[in-house]
Amino acid sequence: MTNDPTTVVETVDYHTAGEPFRIVRTGLPPIAGDTVAERRAIAIGAGGTATAPRRGPLDDIRRLLTHEPRGHAGMYGGFVVPPDDDEAHLGVLFWHKDGYSTACGHGTIALGAWAVDSGLVAAPDDGVARVRIDVPSGRVTATVRRQAGRTTDVTFRNVPTRIAARKIAVSTSRGTASVDIAHSGACYASVDATSLGLTVTTDRLPELTTIGREIRAALADEPTTRHPDDPMLSGVYGVILHEELPAGASGPNQRNVTVFADGQIDRSPCGSGTSARLALLADSGRLGPDDELRHESITGTVFTGRLAGYHPQGVITEVTGTAHRTGEHRFLLHADDTLGTGFLL
């Protein structure tokens, strides 16, 4: 990106269960690559990593939209790109303040709503529309439900979720944590927060964040966090700290906070993280084919999740939530703005 004052980046912003998702409509430079996965690798750049991408025109836009004063450290979003083939409606590169992720369930829900709300995908006033989206970890489908011309909720069907390990002992500042590893488009480590003397409540958020960062760092060389087929999907993306709530008639009820990237907090129950929890609950015999997980976030918002089938690479999961448009923005970077693409605190 240049500091030309006529440079314009236009976005449509949504929140999914409280977690922001900024969809970039215009202002992107050309993005090379034949597939979404290739485009992500090129966006990261030679010598860069998912959480430390190489600077370039595209990454300058990511920084512009996630750094203050135009964004904030909790911002999340996506660059809309062409799909891998004409069987999908769109592709997306997911990003946050630290770099580029391989999966984003809350973003998939927002993109499904946006695709229908914007007219990109035709939908009935009453009924459902299916939006097929190519993401770096594969192809996902968002089923958008409509009533009286309005989107009411969205269910996304994730790529297969595979359990890689159970009960890995990890030392933390609060004692030894028992960690489960699951790959659900990204790699998640799950920990019972109460086993470390914590509750998933906002007053304990600093401690939860610290523990999440410690566990992620401790698992940096853990073999089970490596994806068997694609190195770009390897490594712990998020640490899910969860606690039990009273079960409902339809199945388990849990509250969680997901600490991802470099200590970011998911305000939603975490979409692809919910897929990881579903697979682990099913593996432990606590979630059957007819059960539903009520998954609550640290902010009190809720996703529901269920098993949708089985696959040679794991279980198929579906996660339902709501997304709401919060604004439309036209961002500028002026030549005399000495802050450039901004700063982080």
Image (cartoon, rainbow, N blue to C red):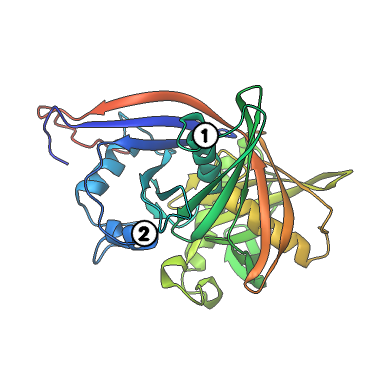
| Amino acid at pointer 2 | Ala
Badge 1 crowding class, 10 Å Cα cut-off, few under 14, some 14 to 19, many 20 or more, is many
Q: Nearer the viewer, residue 3 or 265?
A: 3
Q: Residue at x 25, y 37 (%)?
A: 27
Query: Residue 300 lies in what quarter of the image?
Result: top right
Residue 50 place in picture, x, y as percent: 36, 59
Give the foreground label among 2 and 1. 1
Q: Which mark is residue 291?
A: none
Residue 195 in view: no
Q: Earlier in the sequence, mark 2 or mark 1?
A: 2
Left or right: residue 46 compared with residue 194: left
Badge 2 crowding class, 10 Å Cα cut-off, few under 14, some 14 to 19, many 20 or more, is many
C-alpha separation, residue under disc 2 versus residue under disc 1: 30 Å
Figure disc tally: 2
In the rendered image, which quarter contains the C terminus? top left
Residue 2 in view: yes
Report the residue marked by disc 2. Answer: 50
Query: Residue 154 lies in what quarter of the image?
Result: top right
Q: Nearer the viewer, residue 56 or 137?
A: 137
In the rendered image, which quarter contains the N terminus? top left
Q: Residue at x 43, y 52 (%)?
A: 262
**In the image, residue 331 above or below residue 165:** above
Report the residue marked by disc 1. Answer: 116
| Amino acid at pointer 1 | Val
Q: Nearer the viewer, residue 265 or 288?
A: 288
Residue 320 place in picture, x, y as percent: 67, 42
Q: Tag 2's secondary structure?
A: loop
Residue 221 place in picture, x, y as percent: 47, 74
